[in-house]
């Protein structure tokens, strides 16, 4: 089998396999958002703000009010990060899929903080 590139069109790649030309388009690669630290940081900050709001307003979080000062301080980011990592590990989901199940995450955070 003979494989050689035919450069008649600069944006597309054509290869000849034997006597028959084959059409190969550009291969697109996507970034793995699950291992992207910036994506994780955005999700953690989002759920930190939501958790503070839940503790302040939601009656389910009444027993968690003692943690409000820690969440508002420097440790809040790391506490939520640890809780979300545990959630991801137990549920076997990706970071990007966390936003699809906000009620489950709310119940999990409530259970952990009590």
Image (spheres, helix red, strand yellow):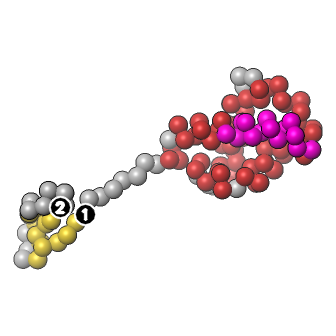
Q: Is residue 77 visible?
A: yes
Residue 75 against residue 45 in the figure, above or below: above
Residue linked to disc 2 = 13
Quadrant holding the N terminus:
bottom left
Q: Is residue 35 left or right of residue 98?
A: left
Q: Residue at x 72, y 33 (%)?
A: 79
Residue 104 coordinates in the image, percent (x, y): 76, 54
Residue 10 against residue 83 in the figure, above or below: below
Q: Is residue 14 left or right of residue 73?
A: left
Q: Is residue 114 visible?
A: no
Quadrant holding the C terminus:
top right
What element does badge 1 sit on? loop
Q: Residue at x 8, y 62 (%)?
A: 8
- 56 inside magenta stretch: yes
| Viewer-nearest residue: 81 or 54 | 54
Which residues are the magenta region? Answer: 46-59
Q: Residue at x 50, y 47 (%)?
A: 33
Q: Are marks 2 and 1 in contact (CB under 8 Å)?
A: yes
Label 1 crowd (10 A; few <14 / some 14-19 / many >=20): few
Identify the image quadrant of residue 83. top right
Q: Residue at x 46, y 48 (%)?
A: 32
Residue 109 coordinates in the image, percent (x, y): 78, 44
Residue at the extreme bottom of the image, as rendered: 20
Identify the image quadrant of residue 76. top right
Residue at the extreme top of the image, as rendered: 74
Residue 28 coordinates in the image, percent (x, y): 33, 56
Q: Is residue 16 left or right of residue 85?
A: left
> Which one is earlier in the sequence, the residue at label 2 or at label 1?
2
Whole-number angstrom distance, CA of label 2 to CA of label 1? 6 Å
Q: Main secondary structure of the magenta part?
A: helix
Residue linked to disc 1 = 25
What element does badge 2 sit on? strand
């Amino acid at each position: 089998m003979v494989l050689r590139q035919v450069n008649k069109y600069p944006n597309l790649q054509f290869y000849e396999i034997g006597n028959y030309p084959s059409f190969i388009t550009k291969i697109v690669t996507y970034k793995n958002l699950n291992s992207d630290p910036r994506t994780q940081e955005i999700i953690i900050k989002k759920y930190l703000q939501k958790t503070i709001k839940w503790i302040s307003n939601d009656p389910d979080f009444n027993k968690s009010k003692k943690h409000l000062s820690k969440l508002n301080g420097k440790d809040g980011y790391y506490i939520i990060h640890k809780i979300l990592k545990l959630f991801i590990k137990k549920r076997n989901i990706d970071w990007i899929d966390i936003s699809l199940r906000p009620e489950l995450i709310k119940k999990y955070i409530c259970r952990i903080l009590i």
